[in-house]
Image (cartoon, helix red, strand yellow):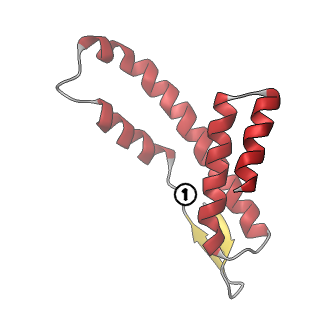
Amino acid sequence: MAKIYNERKKVIIIAVREAKRRIDKWEHKITSANKGTKLEAMQPKMKRNAEIEFNKLVKLENEIKEILGEEKLPTIFNVPYLDCGRQVYRLNKRYGGLQLQKEIDIVKDK
């Protein structure tokens, strides 16, 4: 949970979508009668990897919201800042070094 200040400088608490909820949703998506045994054998490792990533993402979102709260920005700015944070997170998983910096510069220009 993060403290956010609204336009009237009142503190409000906003819960970020919790990792557990994301994990449950993901698990429901991959669990089906149509999936084969090969996928079933991979599911425990896939679930561990997903849990790690979802927890990292929730931590990042909470940190972004805390910064926005400390800066006393209106809550209307939460959505674009969280979106930007998620984009940078995805880029960080995909690229590194100079290419990562170039991709982040593109996101900043948006």
The image quarter containing residue 83 is bottom right
Where residue 7 sits, quadrant-wise, is: bottom right
* Residue at figure coordinates x 70%, y 49% from the top left: 107
Q: Position of residue 32 (x, y in %)?
A: 22, 29
Determine the secondary structure under disc 1. Answer: loop
Locate residue 95 relative to residue 19 in the image: left or right. right
Relative height, residue 78 to residue 20 (above, below): below
The correct choice, above or below, for 29 with respect to 18 in the image is above
Position of 52 compared to 73: left or right? Answer: left
Spot occupied by residue 38 in the image (x, y as percentages of width and height):
30, 11
Which residue is denoted by mark 1 in the rendering? 16
Image quadrant containing the N terminus = bottom right
Residue at horizontal 18 percent and vertical 24 percent from the top: 34
Depth order, front residue of 45/97:
97
Q: How many marks?
A: 1
Question: In front: 100, or 33?
Answer: 100
Residue sticking out furthest to the bottom: 8
Q: What amino acid is labelled 1 in the image?
A: Val
- Residue 78 picture location, percent across and down: 63, 66
Residue drawn at point x = 65 percent, y = 31 percent: 93
